[in-house]
């Protein structure tokens, strides 16, 4: 017997300027089913959803390959409103709500009900008068459909966050003919009880015949509420399973599993790593970085170690270096070779010999309209008063010394440029990354923190950068902390890897620990045990 | 080849090309109309150097990230206070007089600038809007103050029971012309030739040089970085807010020096509403010279001030020859200065809020 | 007890600007020694003259474009029309209407251009508006000084500078446009309104009958009958005599106002309670309004108030225009267009995602505001009677915006009420400041400077407060992540 799918996306492929982000992916959802879409960052989930929604970014970059069928019939969705016409709605992670409007107004935004007037018959629909009574009735119905009992005339601004999300959901189901709702990481900003409420609401909606695509990395939520799931990995379709036929461990393995290539030769390792010689010790560390909150982490990093910090995006791993360097407010204790850092004092980490290569290379790592040499020497000039010549009472920039040093770094890191005077903004991504690295190394640090070191760099350059890091570690004894969302990278050269989930430390693993261990740690769980079998 | 031309064209921008073209046209029209080109050029040079420092005040402001400083009125007021104090104290020696005026102006200007900088730190993103009206309010407030200051000197106040200070105060007895006349010389005929106010030009270039040295110092580079990329600067351990205050204070202090330089060249101090639009003119000048909302160099100041003042110096006599009535030069100034500001604003703003 | 005191303190803080200015005005009136009757007469004249313009600022605030410093351009459109109307020799209300007819298309074009410019500079509309105002002034001067008379030959020694090129600094409007709107008698207005009402109702009835929309025509017939009755009443001799004037004694205006508002409240009660039977209708509101009207009526017997009311005359037509604009602003909010503007003003991102054409909505807002500003300037000029060719439009933006802000409005929120209160307070200050300065400091000039400073200062403070970033940092440790509701 043929199972009739509500949504059938077959063999979807998409490439962005030669870079294949989706390769023959399938997604099938039955009516009234809750279907989880899972995968690491960069697995292709967002791209797949963009295709489903007909977002302009897909069509302005060459469209996609593959077919999309809705209710068995081919569907061409090349604009967001077409997706709406087909009955597809989306509950975003960043709420599309207007705080100053009432719940009714938010539910009905852009689709207000109005009555025609004399003028409107001649001058257009926009001059019709609003029918507040009908709108209120519709809003009440939508709210009760999802089992919510808030007054529809309340302003959204005063509501707790969980309620705001429910208003967002109410808005979607108020749209006539809604058949499929996509939830993108909905529980990310919710408390535990709010998240439970949300899962209940999802079940209620599904029982009314509306299918749900549930994008999440939380395995426990998936096990609780989903009927089936699809796993993507590196843009490829890995598996589609019914929940009753699988387990948490299996899902974790499917999300992670791939071949790891060790970058370093264990024989040549002459380092002595000791638990008594700690380079950096972090205690009860909290960081207020929007989107990457850290909620209490304890770590000890040994001198001479290459320590990896991994985890999914938004889980807090990037918040750690940002907090240490003082870019965001933080609390807790950070000790560097025994001395405590003053987290409130900007630049204190730099003074203690910690250098950081930021994950946001264009936004934080570079002065895009300055020359390569100015970029490379800037931090050292400010913190260590290097590259300065004193002329009387004034400290002037020593551009000759800067130029010489820049030339050295260009040679050392093989930065492809027309010379040290070229503007940093005009370099390719990989070379920009090298300039950031050069800047960090110029202050001659004791500890180097690199975040997302090979993001946006081509394969060849990736290997070079990583090998150079290992070289620095082995030859100079430089302690390196590497924060990355690419597990393969971390497992290829780190001595230990800490997985951060939900702002806390999930587990510290060794590179050759099983895939399932990594998957489970990343997937995080609110409950202690997640079904061990 | 045509791609390079196009990129140069895009960089310079249509309004600037129009302005340069306009300047060259009226210059070319001068001689055939029977005007003395040397005296016109001399006028242009003098106006360039006397306004220059006011335009220079834009550089630290733009570089530190607060955008175009429409509020240099604060600095102008500080300078005027210094100058009027010098006259009140009756300092006879013109050099001492102007030195005193500048020191007092610098001090008051720096204090004002620090407070102003603290305000601007609170309104990040709307600095230009706020600074325009703060500038206007300050001038309006000072109008009341000029009426009430307890000055006694006959030079400063209206005689015979009039109230408050005069609108225009002559600098003949104090430091009028002290820079201009220093080592001044004339090329060609003493009356119709090209007169060069050497002292003034030297002072202007000296100030430019000092500012340039500052921009190349450790502090100056930190300040420029703060304006260019606050996140980057913060990650290098520099307090961005402090840098912004520094830039504002230096800008305001320069403005106070600038107005005194201007006044000594003009020969008069102008109080009340006269400095109301000086902020706009200085902004326009630096923009004409090639600056943008985010980046301003000293070369922009030198070129821009020359073009802007040059047009005004040449346009008025030319216009009077062509159309005897009306104040065409003033109208042109309004159109040019506001036009270029509008152009610069429309280039950068795109989708913020 | 402290709960209500807390609420009271909050009420004061919310309205701190208005309260400050009320105190300032009272102080200044007292200090100036001006008799209240004089102040009131001047004040009511100024309200009539400037009120319309201030109300024109509301729509851009609604649409999220901030304070419209570009109303200068609407004023310029009006002035261009005024020149030609005077030159062609049209007088009185016909001249005024011709001015409206000429200026409106110009204002629409200008408004469209300004709207497009503002769309390029989202987030910087206010500074763009400021600079644009000055730029437009330059172009205007170019046009009036060199084009008129020069390129466009105009032969009129009364209007043109001797020499033939350029318009004179001042043009006297007495005899042509002065008081052209003010002097329209109430009788004329009622006649016009009657004919318009009948036409609209007949069209609506006809449309409903022909298109068979099923809408009730009974209501329309009743309304036509009512209109007919009102019109017939005006033929009664006493009524006719009363209505034939153009200036209404303030006392009569206030009484008429109280009576009509009370009737409206009664109608609301009857309509909602008895006819439509809405359960959630709040009856307290109209009852409170009726009580307030009763108190107001009582107040008119208080001596000083009565004195003022018997002294001041207001030009009815002009005031009716102001009332009409208030009604228009309210009605706009009840339409889809108004709701779209509100949505765009609150969040462009959400508006865009909801399918609203953000750019088009903003342009419509600008066109409306510019046209209204244009009409406002026409009203201003006809009342003040002299057309200061190069100065009439230069301070318009500053003073109008300052007046709006004094009434308690802000860059994000402005209502009819705030506009009216602002006009009253700001202009009261304007009237008494010079005399107050003279009495307090022996310097009338000081008072004049003070009022200009107030105008600039109020705008500076309001802009700063709008941009002020108060960062409340939550405790890091318990920091629950706050969802970033799109404030965009």
Image (cartoon, rainbow, N blue to C red):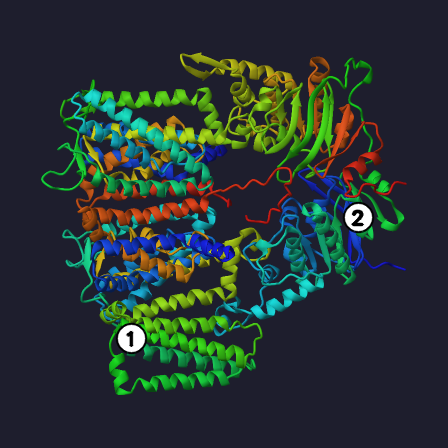
In the picture provided, is B311 more to the left or to the right than B348? left
In this rendering, would C173 be left or right of C213? Answer: left
The answer to whether residue A465 is seen in the rendering is: no
In the displayed structure image, the side of residue A248 where residue B41 appears, left or right:
left
Question: Mark 1 — residue?
Answer: C252
The residue that disc 2 covers is A222
Chain ID of residue with mark 1: C
Q: Residues within 10 Å of mark 2 (few under 14, many from 20)?
A: many
SS for dot 1: helix
On-image quarter of the N terminus of chain A: bottom right
Task: Point out the frontmost of discs 1 and 2.
Answer: 1
Q: Compared with residue A319, is residue A211 higher up or lower down, i.e. above or below?
A: below
Per the rendering, the mark at residue C231 is none
Neighbour class for label 1 at 10 Å: few (<14), some, many (≥20)? few
Quarter of the figure with the C terminus of chain A: top right
- Left or right of C441: which side holds A363? right
* Residue extending furthest toward the left: B160
Whether residue C55 is visible to the viewer of this picture, yes or no, is yes
Where residue A112 appears, as percent x and y from the top left, is 58, 64
Query: How many labels sit on residues?
Result: 2
Q: CA distance from mark 1 to mark 2?
A: 74 Å
- Is residue A174 positioned above or below A242 on the image? below
**Which residue is situated farthest in the front direction here?**
C1
Q: Chain of mark 2?
A: A
């Amino acid at each position: 017997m043929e199972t009739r799918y509500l949504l059938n996306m077959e063999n979807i492929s998409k490439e962005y300027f030669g870079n294949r982000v989706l390769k023959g992916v399938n997604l099938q959802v039955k009516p009234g089913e809750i279907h989880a879409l899972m995968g690491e960052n960069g697995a292709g989930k967002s791209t797949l959803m963009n295709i489903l929604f007909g977002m302009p970014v897909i069509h302005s970059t060459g469209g996609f390959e593959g077919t999309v069928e809705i209710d068995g019939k081919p569907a061409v969705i090349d604009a967001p409103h077409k997706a709406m016409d087909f009955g597809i709605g989306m509950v975003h992670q960043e709420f599309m709500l207007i705080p100053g409007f009432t719940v009714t107004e938010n539910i009905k935004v852009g689709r207000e009900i109005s009555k025609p007037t004399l003028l409107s018959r001649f001058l257009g629909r926009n001059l019709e008068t609003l029918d507040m009574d009908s709108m209120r009735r519709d809003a009440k119905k939508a709210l009760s459909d999802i089992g919510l009992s808030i007054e529809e005339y309340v302003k959204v601004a005063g509501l707790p966050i969980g309620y705001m999300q429910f208003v967002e959901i109410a808005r979607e189901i108020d749209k006539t003919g809604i058949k499929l709702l996509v939830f993108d990481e909905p529980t990310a900003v919710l408390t535990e009880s709010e998240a439970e409420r949300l899962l209940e609401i999802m079940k209620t909606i599904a029982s009314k015949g509306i299918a749900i695509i549930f994008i999440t990395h939380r395995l426990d939520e998936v096990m609780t509420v989903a009927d089936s799931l699809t796993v993507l990995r590196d843009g490829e379709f890995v598996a589609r399973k019914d929940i009753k036929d699988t387990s948490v461990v299996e899902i974790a393995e499917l999300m992670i599993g791939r071949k790891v290539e060790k970058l370093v030769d264990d024989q040549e390792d002459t380092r002595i790593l000791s638990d008594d010689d700690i380079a950096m010790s972090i205690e009860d560390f909290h960081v207020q970085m929007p989107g990457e909150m850290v909620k209490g982490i304890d770590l000890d990093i040994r001198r001479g170690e290459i320590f990896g910090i991994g985890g999914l995006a938004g889980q807090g791993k990037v918040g750690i270096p940002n907090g240490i360097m003082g870019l965001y407010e933080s609390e807790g204790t950070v000790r560097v070779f025994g001395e405590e850092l003053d987290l409130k004092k900007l630049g204190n980490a730099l003074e203690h010999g910690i250098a950081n290569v930021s994950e946001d290379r264009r936004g934080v790592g570079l002065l895009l309209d300055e020359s390569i040499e100015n970029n490379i020497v800037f931090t050292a000039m400010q913190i260590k008063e290097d590259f300065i010549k004193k002329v009387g009472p004034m400290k002037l920039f020593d551009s000759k010394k800067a130029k010489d040093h820049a030339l050295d770094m260009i040679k050392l890191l093989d930065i492809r440029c027309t010379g040290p005077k070229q503007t940093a903004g005009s370099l390719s991504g990989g070379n920009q990354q090298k300039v950031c690295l050069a800047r960090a190394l110029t202050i001659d640090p004791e500890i180097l923190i690199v975040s997302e070191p090979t993001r946006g760099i081509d394969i060849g350059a990736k290997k070079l950068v990583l090998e150079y890091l290992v070289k620095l570690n082995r030859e100079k004894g430089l302690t390196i902390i590497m924060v990355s969302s690419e597990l393969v990278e971390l497992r290829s050269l780190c001595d230990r890897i800490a997985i951060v989930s939900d702002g806390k430390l999930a587990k510290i693993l060794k590179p050759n620990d099983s895939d399932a261990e990594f998957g489970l740690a990343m997937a995080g769980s609110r409950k202690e045990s997640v079904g061990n079998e | 080849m045509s791609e390079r031309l196009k990129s140069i064209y895009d960089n310079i921008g249509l309004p600037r090309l129009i302005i340069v073209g306009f300047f060259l046209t009226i210059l070319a029209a001068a001689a055939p109309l029977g005007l003395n080109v040397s005296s016109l050029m001399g006028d242009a040079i003098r106006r360039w150097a006397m306004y220059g420092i006011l335009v220079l005040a834009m550089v630290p402001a733009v570089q530190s990230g607060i955008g175009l400083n429409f509020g240099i009125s604060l600095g102008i007021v500080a300078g005027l206070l210094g100058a009027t104090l010098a006259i009140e104290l009756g300092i006879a020696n013109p050099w001492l007089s102007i030195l005193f005026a500048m020191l007092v102006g610098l001090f008051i200007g720096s204090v004002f600038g620090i407070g102003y900088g603290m305000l601007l730190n609170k309104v990040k993103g709307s600095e230009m809007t706020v600074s325009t009206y703060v500038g206007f309010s300050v001038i309006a407030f000072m109008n009341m103050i000029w009426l009430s200051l307890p000055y006694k000197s006959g030079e400063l106040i209206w005689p015979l029971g009039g109230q408050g200070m005069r609108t225009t105060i002559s600098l003949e007895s104090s430091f009028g012309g002290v820079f201009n006349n220093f080592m001044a010389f004339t090329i060609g005929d003493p009356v119709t030739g090209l007169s060069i106010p050497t002292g003034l030009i030297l002072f202007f270039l000296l100030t430019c040089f000092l500012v340039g040295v500052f921009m190349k110092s450790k502090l100056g580079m930190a300040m420029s970085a703060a304006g260019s990329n606050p996140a980057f600067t913060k990650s290098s351990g520099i307090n961005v807010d402090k840098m912004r205050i520094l830039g504002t204070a230096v800008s305001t202090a320069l403005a106070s020096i600038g107005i005194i330089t201007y006044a000594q060249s003009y020969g008069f101090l102008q109080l009340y509403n006269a400095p109301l639009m000086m902020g706009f003119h200085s902004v326009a000048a630096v923009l004409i010279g090639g600056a943008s909302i985010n980046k301003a160099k000293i070369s922009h100041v030198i070129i821009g001030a020359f073009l802007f003042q040059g047009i005004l110096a040449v346009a008025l006599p030319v216009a009077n020859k062509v159309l005897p009535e009306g104040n065409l030069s003033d109208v042109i100034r309004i159109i040019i200065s506001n036009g270029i500001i509008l152009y610069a604003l429309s280039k950068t703003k795109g989708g913020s809020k | 007890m402290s709960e209500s005191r807390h609420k009271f303190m909050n009420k004061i803080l919310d309205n701190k600007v208005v309260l400050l200015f009320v105190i300032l005005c009272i102080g200044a009136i007292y200090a100036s020694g001006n008799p209240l009757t004089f102040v009131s007469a001047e004040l009511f004249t100024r309200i009539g003259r400037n009120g319309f313009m201030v109300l024109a600022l509301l729509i851009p605030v609604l649409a999220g474009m901030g304070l419209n410093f570009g109303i200068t351009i609407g004023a310029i459109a009006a002035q261009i029309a005024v020149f030609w109307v005077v030159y062609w020799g049209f007088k009185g209300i016909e001249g005024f209407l011709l001015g409206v007819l000429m200026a409106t298309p110009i204002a629409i074009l200008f408004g469209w251009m300004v709207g497009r410019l503002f769309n390029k500079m989202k987030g910087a509309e206010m500074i763009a508006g400021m600079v644009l105002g000055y730029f437009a002034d330059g172009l205007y001067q170019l046009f009036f000084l060199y084009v008129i008379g020069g390129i466009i030959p105009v032969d009129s020694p009364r209007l043109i500078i001797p020499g033939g090129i350029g318009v004179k600094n001042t043009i006297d409007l007495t005899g042509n446009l002065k008081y052209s709107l003010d002097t329209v008698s109430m009788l004329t207005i009622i006649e016009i309104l009657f004919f318009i009402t009948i036409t609209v109702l007949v069209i609506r009835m006809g449309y409903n009958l022909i298109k068979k929309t099923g809408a009730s025509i009974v209501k329309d017939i009743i309304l036509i009958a009512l209109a007919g009755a009102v019109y017939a009443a005006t033929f009664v001799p006493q009524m006719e005599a009363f209505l034939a004037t153009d200036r209404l004694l303030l006392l009569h205006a206030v009484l008429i106002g109280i009576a009509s508002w009370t009737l409206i409240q009664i109608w609301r009660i009857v309509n909602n309670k008895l006819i439509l039977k809405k359960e959630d209708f709040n009856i307290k509101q109209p009852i409170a309004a009726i009580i307030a009207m009763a108190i107001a009526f009582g107040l008119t017997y208080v001596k000083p108030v009565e004195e003022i009311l018997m002294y001041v005359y207001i030009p009815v037509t002009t005031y009716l225009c102001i009332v009409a604009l208030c009604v228009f602003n309210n009605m706009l909010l009840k339409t889809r267009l108004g709701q779209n503007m509100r949505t765009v003003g609150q969040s462009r991102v959400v508006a865009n995602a909801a399918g609203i054409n953000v750019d088009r909505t903003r342009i419509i807002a600008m066109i409306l505001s510019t046209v209204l500003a244009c009409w406002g300037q026409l009203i201003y000029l006809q009342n003040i009677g002299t057309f200061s060719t190069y100065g009439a439009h230069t301070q318009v933006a500053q003073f109008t915006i300052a007046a709006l802000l004094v009434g308690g409005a802000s860059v994000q929120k402005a209502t009819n009420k705030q506009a009216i209160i602002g006009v009253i307070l700001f202009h009261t200050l304007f009237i008494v400041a010079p005399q107050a300065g003279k009495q307090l400091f022996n310097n009338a000039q000081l008072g004049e400077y003070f009022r200009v400073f107030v105008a600039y200062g109020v705008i500076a403070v309001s802009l700063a407060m709008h941009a002020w970033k108060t960062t409340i940092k939550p405790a890091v440790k318990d920091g629950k992540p706050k969802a970033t509701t799109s404030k965009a």
